[in-house]
């Protein structure tokens, strides 16, 4: 432990990693609370795996068709938001079970991502590294991105805390009281999607579910 703190004072990349972990825990804790309360814990997994499809498409368009300004992060954000809105609209309008829709998004996102990765010429290690992430490679721009997410999450939760609670615990009663359940449910999904995108760049797709759900579940037990 002493060696770690000594190295922490000497190496910038360790300082960035610790800062990224602390900032990520804010969004995880806040958004994860509502995700667990709403019982849509697999939502994180579905959106996380859908981002691979967006990243694969972005990388393909960048390499094959010369879309120079397009980066994997742009594809991840677009895919995550699209997945969240599809899950929300199908659940609300088609009255389909959330776990069924999430499972479909999960499979389709992974399949699309792997297809575009295979179609893209060159070495695709950058995209495959998103499966597991690398917190030691966090950059200053990543830190600012996570900080911006924390500010947005905290601001929205403070502004709409009662509405989010109503949607998560008793949507029918909230609807009777005149709360726009559909709007706040979709807003919650969008917050979860943005949190997943940021976490994918830090810890990878595999650990997103664990970070969003396990700390909240453990605190609930205590």
Image: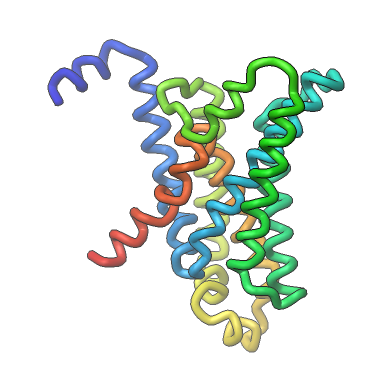
Tell me residue 130's x, y (percent).
Answer: 54, 32
Which of these two is toward me, 136 or 116?
A: 116
Q: Is residue 187 above or below residue 47?
A: below
In the picture provided, is 57 more to the left or to the right than 38?
right
Q: Position of residue 141 (x, y in %)?
A: 56, 24
- Residue sticking out furthest to the right: 65
State whether residue 74 is above or below residue 67. Answer: below
Q: Residue at x 38, y 35 (%)?
A: 21
| Quarter location, residue 112 | top right
Residue 117, picture quadrant: top right
Instruction: Residue at 44%, 43% (x, y): give it.
Output: 207
Vertical position of residue 217 compared to residue 106: above or below? below
Position of the C terminus, as image quadrant, is bottom left
Q: Quadrant of residue 104?
A: bottom right
Q: Residue at x 49, y 61 (%)?
A: 41
Quadrant location, the N terminus: top left
Q: Position of residue 11 (x, y in %)?
A: 32, 12
Residue 207 is at least partly visible in this image: yes
Color style of the picture: rainbow
Residue 95 point in image, percent of width and height = 71, 77
Identify the residue at image location x=67%, y=55%: 105
Q: Is residue 90 left or right of residue 197?
A: right
In the depicted view, which residue is nearer to us: 28 or 164?
28
């Amino acid at each position: 432990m002493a060696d770690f703190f000594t190295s922490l004072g000497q190496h910038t990349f360790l300082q960035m990693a610790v800062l990224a972990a602390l900032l990520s825990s804010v969004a995880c804790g806040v958004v994860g609370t509502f995700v667990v309360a709403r019982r849509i814990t697999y939502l994180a997994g579905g959106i996380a795996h859908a981002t691979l499809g967006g990243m694969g498409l972005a990388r393909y368009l960048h390499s094959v068709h010369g879309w120079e300004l397009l980066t994997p992060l742009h594809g991840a954000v677009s895919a995550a938001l699209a997945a969240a809105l599809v899950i929300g609209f199908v659940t609300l309008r088609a009255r389909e079970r959330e776990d069924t829709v999430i499972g479909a998004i999960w499979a389709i996102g992974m399949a699309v991502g792997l297809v575009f990765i295979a179609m893209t010429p060159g070495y695709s290690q950058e995209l495959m590294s998103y499966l597991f992430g690398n917190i030691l490679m966090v950059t200053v721009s990543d830190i600012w991105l996570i900080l911006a997410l924390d500010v947005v999450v905290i601001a929205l939760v403070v502004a709409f805390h009662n509405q989010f609670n109503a949607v998560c615990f008793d949507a029918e009663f909230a609807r009777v009281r005149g709360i726009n359940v559909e709007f706040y449910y979709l807003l919650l999904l969008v917050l979860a999607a943005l949190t997943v995108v940021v976490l994918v760049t830090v810890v990878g797709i595999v650990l997103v579910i664990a970070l969003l759900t396990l700390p909240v579940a453990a605190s609930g037990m205590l």
